[in-house]
């Protein structure tokens, strides 16, 4: 038996907007950081100059990242509470993994970890967020 199509409420629409815009901003920033910022820093010169460029770039991204994650989490948790759908639960699980990967790169960045390892983990963030975005595609109500 087919489920009746639900008409989204204004609250559900607002939560979806928070979830989707937050995820999109976070995805774009993490993808740019992994692909563009690290490559630009590698071209900057020696290790001290590279470190300065990377630190400055990620520091400027941090306030936007925090706002994007907060919006995304607020929307995701709100939708899960309202709809209790499997897609929302999967998206929140992938979000949790992405938050863990971000935390992991921060910890690795403060330790003697090879850059190739840090870069590999940095690339998992946009990959996980692509899954988050896809988990919400085509979902109505």
Image (cartoon, helix red, strand yellow):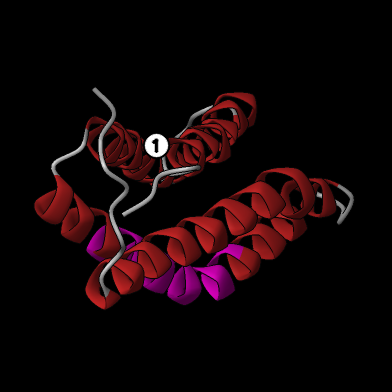
Q: Is residue 82 above or below residue 9?
A: above
Considering the image in quadrants, where does the C terminus appear?
bottom left
139 left or right of 34 in image: left
Residue at 17% x, 60% y: name it.
78
20 left or right of 19 in image: right
Q: Check if residue 48 falls in the magenta segment.
A: no
Residue at 31% x, 61% y: name it.
7
Q: Secondary structure at mark 1?
A: helix
100 left or right of 139 in image: left
Q: Quadrant of residue 90?
A: top left
10 Å crowding of disc 1: few (<14), some (14-19), many (20+): some
Residue at 23% x, 22% y: name it.
1
The one of 134 and 44 positioned closer to us in this rendering: 134
Residue at 35% x, 34% y: name it.
94
Total marks shown come to: 1
Q: Check if residue 68 falls in the magenta segment.
A: yes
Q: Quadrant of residue 28?
A: bottom right
The one of 123 and 129 positioned closer to us in this rendering: 129
Q: Position of residue 95 (x, y in %)?
A: 34, 42
Q: Is residue 11 above or below residue 88?
A: below
Q: Is residue 50 above or below residue 53?
A: above
Name the residue tied to disc 1: 101
Q: Quadrant of residue 89?
A: top left
The one of 80 and 103 positioned closer to us in this rendering: 80
Q: Position of residue 139 (x, y in %)?
A: 40, 44
- The stretch in magenta equals 58-74
Magenta part, dominant SS: helix
Q: Is residue 140 above or below residue 98?
A: below
Q: Position of residue 34 (x, y in %)?
A: 67, 44
Q: Position of residue 136 (x, y in %)?
A: 42, 44
């Amino acid at each position: 038996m087919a489920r009746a199509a639900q008409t989204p409420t204004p609250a559900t629409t607002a939560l979806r907007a928070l979830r989707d815009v937050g995820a999109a901003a976070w995805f774009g920033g993490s993808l740019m950081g992994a692909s563009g910022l690290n490559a630009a820093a590698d071209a900057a010169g020696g290790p001290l100059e590279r470190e300065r460029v990377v630190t400055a770039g990620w520091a400027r991204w941090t306030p936007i990242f925090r706002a994007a994650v907060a919006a995304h989490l607020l929307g995701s948790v709100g939708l899960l509470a309202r709809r209790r759908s499997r897609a929302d639960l999967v998206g929140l699980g992938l979000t949790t993994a992405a938050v863990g990967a971000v935390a992991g790169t921060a910890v690795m960045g403060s330790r003697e970890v090879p850059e190739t390892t840090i870069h590999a983990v940095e690339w998992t963030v946009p990959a996980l967020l692509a899954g988050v975005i896809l988990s919400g595609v085509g979902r109505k109500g």
